[in-house]
Every structure is written in C-alpha cells, then in structure tokens.
Image: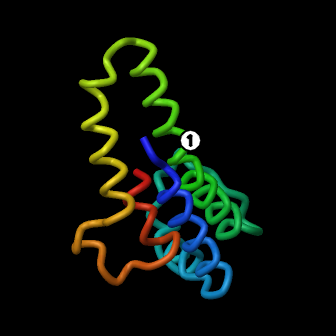
Amino acid sequence: MNTADIRAQISRAQELDAKSGLLTQHLTTRLPDLHSAIQLPESDRNAVMTRFVSAYIDQVPDLLDAAHAVAREAGIESQIEPVLKIAEQFFVQPPSLLDGHEGLEGLLDEAY
C-alpha cells in the first residue's frame, strides 16, 4: 500500500485551503444542518469545525496504513488489499461527481 500520493494530495489541498478558505466557506453553509448532538462553541464554530475536518482528512493515510498492517498480521491481506486499493484510488483520482470541489472540501467526501 502506497499512501505517499494521498499524503501529497492532502498537502496540496491544505495549501490551497490556507490561501482560499474554501473549506471554511463550505462548512459555514453546512453548520446549521449539524445533528443536534454535535455541540460547538458559538464563538468560533467555523474554526473548530474546520480544524476537526482538516485533522479528520489528515488521518486517512494513517488509517489505510493501519488497516493494511492489521490485515497482513491477521493473514487476510489478499482479501483486504483490493478494498484498500479502491479506497486509495478513490482518494487519489476522485470520480467526476466531485468535479468542482477543490482543496480540503473536495477531499472530505473521499476521506469519509
């Protein structure tokens, strides 16, 4: 499993977002739709959610690496490897459905 491409993609998205603020803009429109169980501080709701989503996306390569290691140790690597490859491919080359979504906003769907 090669997650270097995913890490590079995330790095580029973080750089774009630092300049454009696209993720924060997107989340601002979505915050009113959050489930009532999710409580954010009123003073900096956007910043808190933006940091969470950014950190969530940042964990994708580590999660894929960990899943691969667990599958290898459990002796089921050949069964799990295709699933991980699909996840990796989806992240590195997202479907055309996500065209127009850039930066971390675009990677949010892939991370999920």
Q: How many marks?
A: 1
**As rendered, which of 1 and 92 lies closer to the eye?**
1
In what quadrant of the picture does the N terminus appear? Answer: top left
**As rendered, which of 80 and 22 lies closer to the eye?**
80
**As rendered, which of 97 and 89 lies closer to the eye?**
89
- In percent of width and height, residue 38 lies at 56, 49
For the point 56% across and 41% down, the residue is 62
Amino acid type, mark 1: Asp
Give the residue furthest to the right: 43
Q: Is residue 88 above or below residue 101?
A: above
The image quarter containing residue 77 is top left
- In percent of width and height, residue 107 lies at 44, 65
**As rendered, which of 44 and 109 lies closer to the eye?**
109
Instruction: Give the residue pinned by disc 1.
Output: 62
Q: Count residues near mark 1 (Cα–Cα under 10 Å), then give few for <14, some for 14-19, many for 20+.
A: few
For the point 59% across and 54% down, the residue is 58
For the point 39% across and 21% down, the residue is 71
- In percent of width and height, residue 54 lies at 61, 60
For the point 61% across and 82% down, the residue is 21
Give the residue furthest to the top: 74
Q: Is residue 68 above or below residue 32?
A: above
In the image, taking residue 2 as reference, residue 8 lies left or right, namely right
